[in-house]
Image: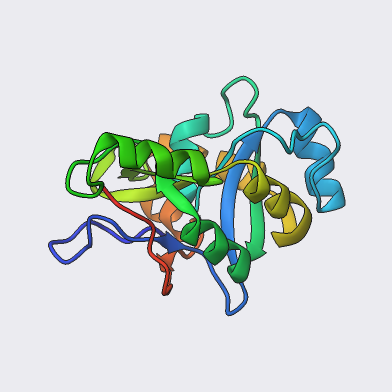
Amino acid sequence: MTAPASPTTPRFAIRALHTASTVTVYQAYSPLIGAPAARDGRFPAAWKRDRMTWIKPSFLWMMYRCGWGTKEGQETVLAVEITREGFAWALSHAELSHYARGVHPDRATWQRGLRRSPARVQWDPERDLRLNPLPYRSLQLGLGGEAARRYADEWTVSIRDVTPLAREIHSLVRAGRLDGAAALLPAETPYPTDVMPPAG
């Protein structure tokens, strides 16, 4: 489950469900894309490899974004297991999606980096079980161009439909059974990486 906020929780850190060789990220799609992706373990032809796609290591941030799988076009929640090598490649080729004073020398430098980078980084407030914001940030990683193609065709190890899990957890939250809901959350822990994307 997502670690509770504490004075020692870093404001910017990657937390994820991960193994020695993979990391799990989440996306939500319409059933037109989500169902065949989960069935076949790969994204279908309808999935556009020339568009920016955003992956989230945080299950609860994904629930916030897709409304527990209730928002139109986001009814199918996918857990996509990708290689750690691919994830590291994306992190090392990422630029912040916004200009941050103190991170970039100036706005022009940031814009040049953004044009060259096939990946985008956003840090958004992590969420609790009621989807309220927490005082530390969760990574969103946008993949475009070469990164999106590699994600779909090289890095993806497995794709699972976790919509039933999302609905079960949501039902427990609505019933006020937060301990039961927390017990079902994916075991997201600090992700060890030598490559840390920019934060700001």
Q: Residue 23, located in which quarter of the rendered image? A: bottom right
Number of numbered callouts drawn: 0
**129 w.r.t. 13: above or below:** above
Rendering colour mode: rainbow
Displayed quadrant of residue 54: top right
Which residue shows up at 72% across the image and 48% down it? 149
Instruction: Please say if 11 is above or below 31.
Output: below
Say which quadrant the N terminus sits in. Answer: bottom left
Q: Position of residue 164 (x, y in %)?
A: 65, 43
Quadrant assignment, res 113: top left
Determine the residue positioned at 75% across, 60% down.
Answer: 154
Residue at the bottom extreme of this rendering: 20
Q: Return the x and y of residue 137 as percentages of the image width and height.
A: 30, 49
Location of residue 67 in the rendering, given as x and y in whole percent from the top left corner: 50, 29
Q: Please name whichever residue, 119 or 172, is drawn nearer the observer in this view of the structure.
A: 119
* Relative depth, front residue between 76 and 33: 33
Q: Is residue 81 left or right of residue 196?
A: right
The answer to whether residue 77 is left or right of residue 2 is right
| Residue 75 visible in the snapshot | yes
Residue furthest toward the top?
72
* Residue 111 percent across, percent down from the top left: 38, 36
- Give the residue displayed 78% in from the left and 54% down from the top: 153
Q: For residue 130, say whether it is visible.
A: no
Along the line of sight, which residue is nearer the eye, 178 or 97? Answer: 97
Q: Residue furthest left?
A: 7
Q: Residue at x 48, y 59 (%)?
A: 91
Query: Could you tell whether 104 is left or right of 115 in the image?
Result: left
